[in-house]
Image (tube, rainbow, N blue to C red):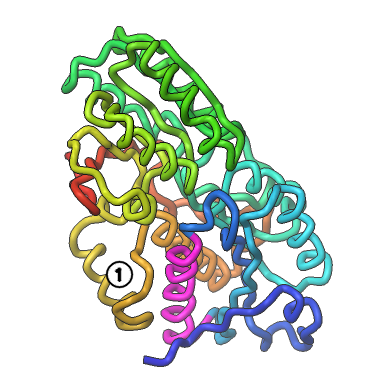
Amino acid sequence: MSVEAVLIDPLEALHSARDGRERAAFRVGLVVPQSGPLGLTGPSALDGALLAAHEVNAAGGVLGRPLELVLVDGGGTPERVAAEVRPLLAAGAVDALAGCHTSDVHRAVETVAAGRVAYVYTPPHEGGSRLPGVLCTGVDPLAQLSLSVSELTDNHHLRRWAFIGNDYIWPRSVHRAATALVVRTGARVVLERRIPFGAVEGAVGPLLDALRASRADALLLSLIGRDQVHFNRALRRSGLDHRLVRLSGALEENGLLALGGDDTGLLYAAMPSFATLDEERRQGLAERHQALCGPWAPVLDAYAVGLYDGLRLLAELAARRSLAPDGLARAARGLLPAEGRPVHLARAEGLGFAVLR
């Protein structure tokens, strides 16, 4: 099957002519990690975006205009990613933005995009207000963790929680929300640590010592990407993986594969993963993805599905001529999932997830 989608380098997008805008391509700046902490999720997310663009174009495009993707590496520092997006917007080289990357990058991109183009951000986010033209289609920490914390506490009789995460805006918000949820169950937080990106390997020894000393029986992980992989591998080597009920808000299929799976029955995800989709949609996406990208394509995950949906949303809003930043939130009503919808638990079983309803 030929791919009805075009992926463009930012430099090419800056220097290619955009004459006759009604006949020109509808270009979306695609901010996806190709490096950095979430780099291991990049190939899957890119496949999700390509599948969405392919299907939009195969159906006639956006008001007859082909949907093209301008790929920006969202794995750099917030300042670096925003600096790459800024000239694309200034030159009118993109008509909208879509991204799945860390929340600190999101806030930096939001600053340069607000009021200029529609920007759809698709992963779980830190909550709070948004600038004009910015839509968050993922869940905030309370919606993500509310069911999970209470169910795990009841099912495993948990009393002492430890929190370990990366040190940036999303884990901070997650830990604030989780503290309130834990206290509500009658348990308490006995340890909190936040580690800079890339520093987990060097901090593993002290972190494991702190976990043992805290006598925690549950661990909330808000580490992301490769940092989460390194830490879960260290937990396995230490034997603590068989003693701690672990809940992650960022564990998806690629991360589970990278850490070699888990058979303890104690590792849970509160990520709206590919596994949590209803069976008909999950099977349909998987079949169309394989038909387009082949049997050896990256596994689909939560980031891929979120970005797929985000691009389909942008295409629909553009077809309705409803991409004006100041009216974007109104225009998207009815096209977004129910706000605040709680996320169900998924338990790691080997290299996959079993969804717990």
Secondary structure character of the magenta stretch overall? helix
Residue 194, horizontal then vertical, whole percent: 55, 27
Measured from the top left, where is residue 261 in percent x and y?
27, 49
Compared with 191, 10 (above or below) is: below
Asked whether 154 or 201 is in front, the reply is: 201
Q: Is residue 39 found left or right of 81 in the rendered image?
A: left
The region drawn magenta spans 42-61
The residue that label 1 is drawn on is 285
> Which quarter shows the C terminus?
top left
Res. 114 in view: yes
Tell me the quadrant of the picture where the N terminus can be found.
Answer: bottom left
Instruction: State yes or no: residue 11 in magenta.
Output: no
| Residue type of the residue flagged with mark 1 | Leu
Q: Quadrant of residue 214?
A: top left
Q: Residue at x 76, y 62 (%)?
A: 84
In the rendered structure, the answer to whether residue 225 lies left or right of residue 290 reads right
